[in-house]
Image (tube, rainbow, N blue to C red):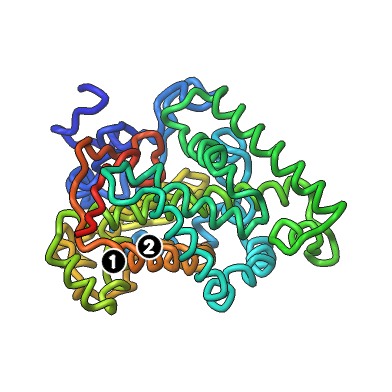
Amino acid sequence: MSMSDTSVFTPEQLWMPGVIANPYPTYHHLRDQSPLHYMFLPAGAISGINEPFRGWALMKFDDVYRALRDHETFVSGRNPLAGKLTPKLVLFQDDPPRNTRFRRLVNTTFTLKRIAELTPWITRVANELLDEIGTADTDIVPSYTMPLPVKVIARVLGIPGEDYVTFKRWSDAFLAFNSMPPGDRAKHGQDMMGYFGRIAAARRAYGAEDLITALVEAEVEGESLEDWEILGFCMLLLIAGNETTTHLIGNILNILVDRPALWQQLREDRRLVEPVIEETLRYESPVQRVPRETTREVEVSGVRIPEGAYVSIFYGAANRDPKAFPQPDEFRLDRELRHHVAFGMGIHYCLGAPLARAEATVTLNTFLDRFPALTRGTGPAVRQTGSLVVFGFQQLPLVLAST
């Protein structure tokens, strides 16, 4: 079987480029077998591990929901790949009580009030990007869906937004553990840590009105954060803040370009904007899977998963489970809006969800204001295959019609 052959559906395919680009047929065939033991990565993909790395896949909505709620059994902080695939990320790979304290530190940055204050600036950036594009046939990924979220998270962190191409390269490399040599990924990671280390040192010396300064000055239980914790925060926010929103916006536009009648409905009734965003989050979840490790032997859907097992929680599969979402492969706006698990659940629910929703809302309204129609561009739409984690576009040519 070739690396891209998806005519036969097996758990061993879940790391392959063809499945990353179109995972839903594989999910459909494997979901009833879940939890299933599978090859997370082939031999040699992880530095120092010369045999395939195996784990357990949870694909049913009920199983995923329960695992996300049971943070005592399915933990982040003991991920066996932390430090091997990626540097340890504060918050994402922390469990209570540390997770609770760290979330409290950054919660004020992502309040609805703060995001509402930021929205006029996001709208200005969106319009500036579209002014540069005009109505040309453009690959919307490098011209819009990539720069907007990176500029926004750079503004929140307090780093220069014009460095967005470098930031995107770093975050792509961080997530590319199935497609980039370990040495190359390590080099990008060192560059990113060095950059944030210099920014943190500057904030210690001078300070500013930004999140990095808040982290530098913060105390948890009377103790300042260590350098690695600050760097881990910055890396997490940069990666999570741009990758997921880039793919969410691209997925929305890709869905709507083939639904001209819905585009006209949206232009006339903006109350449909929120349902379109929420159904896109379910239908084409920008984050497809997240890692956990079991702290005890646990039974899931009649299958015993041992203590210390690596577990992949498949948001993308859960959000297409027909037992939770009737006709799951149809894009419909009459569903329960926020029933999906695209942003997770429980204590690890995505802190940046309100910001991602705000950027998607600004984008959709701005495009609807400016363009009577969307059509496909001349080049092919190409899904990303460099990362197991996210689902979105590497290339998405569109024509933004002005008449």
| Residue found at x 27% / y 55% | 253
Front one among 83 and 124 = 124
User: Is 296 on the left or on the right of 220, as rendered?
Assistant: left
State which quarter of the image contains the N terminus: top left
* Numbered disc total: 2
User: Is 384 on the left or on the right of 153, as rendered?
Assistant: left
| Residue found at x 46% / y 56% | 128
Front one among 24 and 64 = 24
- The three-letter code of the residue at mark 1 reads Leu
| Residue found at x 48% / y 54% | 149
The residue identified by callout 1 is: 368
Residue 53 occupies quadrant: top left
Front one among 193 and 319 = 193
**Image location of residue 36, percent across then percent down:** 31, 44
Disc on res. 6: none
- The three-letter code of the residue at mark 2 reads Thr
**Image location of residue 269, percent across then percent down:** 23, 78
**Image location of residue 124, percent across then percent down:** 48, 63
Label 2, residues with CA under 10 Å away: few <14, some 14-19, many ≥20: many
- Label 1 to label 2, Cα distance in Å? 8 Å
The residue identified by callout 2 is: 363
Residue 42 occupies quadrant: top left
**Image location of residue 86, percent across then percent down:** 57, 37
User: Is 176 on the left or on the right of 103, as rendered?
Assistant: left
Label 1, residues with CA under 10 Å away: few <14, some 14-19, many ≥20: some
Secondary structure found at label 2? helix
Q: Which of the two labelled residues, at mark 1 and mark 2, occupies the earlier sequence position?
A: 2
**Residue 274 drawn above or below residue 396:** below
State which quarter of the image contains the C terminus: bottom left
| Residue found at x 48% / y 38% | 172
Camera sees residue 379? yes
